[in-house]
Image: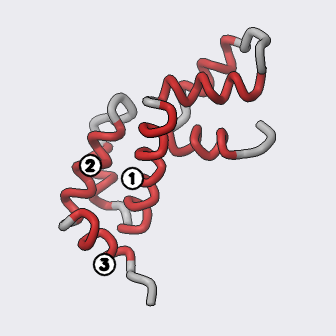
């Protein structure tokens, strides 16, 4: 039988507060004044998905800048990327960028 999100949080992180703390540390530069409050109000399933995505970004690309570089290389190949496209990508969240990277055609 599949665990509920609450059971998964307790099994993997010990507490919801610890999961929020880890997500905050993985967000690095992508947080603002309201981030902590929004994370505390999020559902367990949302927090688990966010942790999964942020961990994958850190493991595969190092940080948000590395993910943006991978997306531009995938879209432009060896051609010089459009600076406005790069700045637009910089305004996206890591979760949105990771989903964008995962698409076969950008």
Is label 1 in a helix, a strand or a loop?
Answer: helix
Closer to the chain start, of discs 1 and 2, is 2
Residue shown at 58% from the left, 26% from the top: 68
Q: Which residue is mark 2?
A: 22
Closer to the chain start, of discs 3 and 1, is 3
Which quadrant holds residue 3?
Answer: bottom left
**Height in image: 87 above or below 6?**
above
**Height in image: 49 above or below 53?**
below
Instruction: Mark 3: give few (<14), some (14-19) or many (20+) Cα within 10 Å.
Output: some
Closer to the chain start, of discs 2 and 3, is 3
Asked whether the residues under the numbered discs 2 and 3 touch, taking CB atoms below 8 Å apart as contact, a structural biologist would say no
Residue shown at 55% from the left, 30% from the top: 67
Instruction: Mark 2: give few (<14), some (14-19) or many (20+) Cα within 10 Å.
Output: some
| Quarter the N terminus occupies | bottom left
Q: Which residue is mark 3?
A: 7
Rendered location of residue 76, percent (x, y): 77, 20
Choose between 22 and 39: the one closer to the eye: 22
Q: CA distance from mark 1 to mark 2?
A: 8 Å
Question: For the image shown, how many numbered marks are present on the structure?
Answer: 3
**Height in image: 99 above or below 17?**
above
Q: Which residue is mark 1?
A: 51
Which residue sits furthest front? 59
Is label 2 in a helix, a strand or a loop?
Answer: helix
Rendered location of residue 50, percent (x, y): 43, 53
Instruction: Mark 1: give few (<14), some (14-19) or many (20+) Cα within 10 Å.
Output: many
Choose between 2 and 81: the one closer to the eye: 2
Choose between 13 and 95: the one closer to the eye: 13
Q: Is residue 44 left or right of residue 22?
A: right
Choose between 91 and 34: the one closer to the eye: 91
Asked whether the residues under the numbered discs 1 and 2 touch, taking CB atoms below 8 Å apart as contact, a structural biologist would say yes
Residue shown at 30% from the left, 42% from the top: 34
| Quarter the C terminus occupies | top right
């Amino acid at each position: 039988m599949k665990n509920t999100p609450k059971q998964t949080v307790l099994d993997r992180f010990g507490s919801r507060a610890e999961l929020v703390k880890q997500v905050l540390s993985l967000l690095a530069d992508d947080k603002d004044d309201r981030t902590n409050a929004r994370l505390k109000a999020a559902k367990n399933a949302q927090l688990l998905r966010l942790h999964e995505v942020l961990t994958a970004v850190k493991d595969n690309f190092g940080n948000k800048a590395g993910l943006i570089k991978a997306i531009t290389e995938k879209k432009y190949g060896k051609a010089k990327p459009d600076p406005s496209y790069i700045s637009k990508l910089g305004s996206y969240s890591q979760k949105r960028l990771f989903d964008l990277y995962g698409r076969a055609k950008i």
